[in-house]
Structures are given as C-alpha cells and as structure tokens.
Image (cartoon, grey):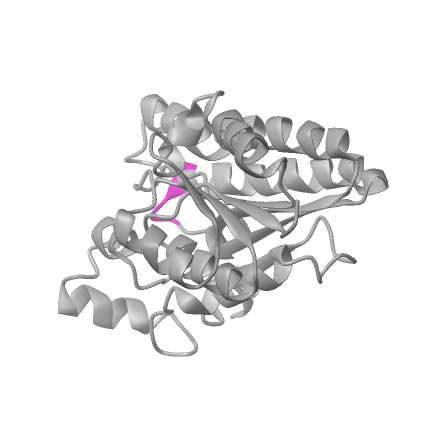
Amino acid sequence: MSKRVVIITDAVEHLGPDLARKLAQRNHNLVLGGASDELANELRELGAAVEVVAEVRDGEDLIRADAVPSLIARANSAFGGFNAAFIRPGAHVMGDMFAATAEDMQAAFEGNMLSTFHALNALVPALIEQGEGGQILVCSSATAIKPYTGAYVYTATRAGAIMLLRTAAQTAAPHGITINGIGTMFLNYPGFLDNTGCRDPEVLERTLGNIPLGRLGEPPEPAHIAAAMLDGQSNYITGEFISVSGGWTSA
C-alpha cells in the first residue's frame, strides 16, 4: 500500500462523510459503504483514491455477517489491504422498559451487538494476517455509559457492544492492533432528530436543557476525534471509549 487505507462502513450520514473528508485531507485512500457519487468525487478531488461498496449503506446492514468482509475484500482487491476501519453499527430502538417488547430487544441486540461481533470477527483476523498492526474504531452511543430511560434496550445493547470491543482489544493488542469506541449523543443529524422528535422546537428546547454545553453537536466535531484515532498517529490507546455528548455523560 503506497498510502494508508481506511474502511468506513457508513459514509452516508452521522460523522462518516466528514470523517472521510478529514482522512482524504490527511493523504488516505478510502473504502466507503454507501457513499454518494457527489461525496466520492469530492474526496477524489482531495487526492484520495475511493472505492464505494453500495450494498453496505448504514448500521443495520452490518447485521449481515458478509457486510464487513465485502468491504475488506474491496480493500484487498483495490489497494492490497487496509490499515484502519471505522465501524458504525446501530439499530435505534426507542422506548422505556414498559414500552419495549421482546422483539425490540432482539432487534437492538442484532443491530448493536451482533453487528459489532460480526465486524470485529472479520477485521481483527484480517489485520493479523497482514501483520502490520492497525486501528479499529467502533461507533456506539454515549448512552452506552449513561442510562437513557427513553431507550431501554438500545442503551443496554450499546453498552454490551463496548464490552465486546474492550475484550477484543485485549486479544488484538499483542498484534499491534488497537480497538477503541466512540459514542455520540445529541448530534445534529437526521437520525437523531427523527428518533427523538427534536424537529419539534419544544422538544428540542427541552432536550437542550439536558446538555451542559446547551447546544447540539455537529458531525465534524466527533469526526475530528475519529480521524485522530484512525490516521496511524494514536497507537498507545486501546480498549477505551470516548463520549462526544456536550458534557451529558459527565453531568
């Protein structure tokens, strides 16, 4: 590989598009899940070689055991391998403990934990086989470390995913592979606004009252942190979780 290569499973929304831009600016080539033609062309203008895997578009696609292997296969065929991967699994199942059903729990488990399991079980052996170390960053949710009663099964399964990556990090560390997590809350993107009702000004106002910084976060902000965890310069941190939530998890 003449340039570092990063896999981003979701380049459609959340922090993925901004992360791709930041890594392109840092001289990386990219394998992207579901990126639009517009984004791919923008990244190529920044100097990156870009491969788009259209059949992997969002977090729920990672429930399929073959989703991440398809991205790895494209990285291998186009670039001869990869150095890092950003994984964004996620099934946003809302409702408190009295509203959640067994079907909700199953959907949350598959979307948040099983998908993380599939991703790690594909990525770690691939990086070990390459023998050059690597970095994996799993996107979870800040609710993984602070209970959120309005998302009972979601919060629990996000926490489970963090324990998966922390345990995997211990196995991968002797091979020079780091595995960390990042989680957002109150991020200003369509998925959050729709799932929480924050398009309603009254709901948004109540929500902002829970955030010490008093505003929603913007996708480039967590993307800045994610890029630092994937660009090959942060290699002495593993098994950790970073909350990007405007101070909510520390309040």
Task: Considering the whole magenta stretch, tell me its main secondary structure.
Answer: loop
**Looking at the image, which residue is at 78% across and 42% down?**
132
From which residue to which does the magenta span run? 149-153
Q: Residue furthest bottom?
A: 213
Q: Is residue 195 above or below residue 221?
A: above
Where residue 76 sits: x, y (%)? 59, 32
**Looking at the image, which residue is at 49% across and 32% down?**
71
Q: Is residue 195 left or right of residue 238?
A: left
**Looking at the image, which residue is at 35% across and 51% down?**
40
**In terms of depth relative to the viewer, which is nearer, 59 or 210?**
59
Where residue 53 sits: x, y (%)? 39, 34
Q: Residue 17: in sight, yes or no?
A: yes
Which quadrant does the N terminus fall into? Answer: top right
Mark count: 0
**In terms of depth relative to the viewer, which is nearer, 75 or 104?**
75
Residue 200 on the magenta segment: no
**In terms of depth relative to the viewer, which is nearer, 163 or 26?**
26
**In terms of depth relative to the viewer, which is nearer, 142 or 209?**
142
Where residue 26 sits: x, y (%)? 56, 65
**Looking at the image, which residue is at 36% across and 44% down?**
151
Quarter where residue 192 is shown: bottom left
Where residue 117 sits: x, y (%)? 57, 28
Quarter where residue 127 is shown: top right
Q: Residue 245: in sight, yes or no?
A: no
Q: Is residue 179 above or below residue 130?
A: below
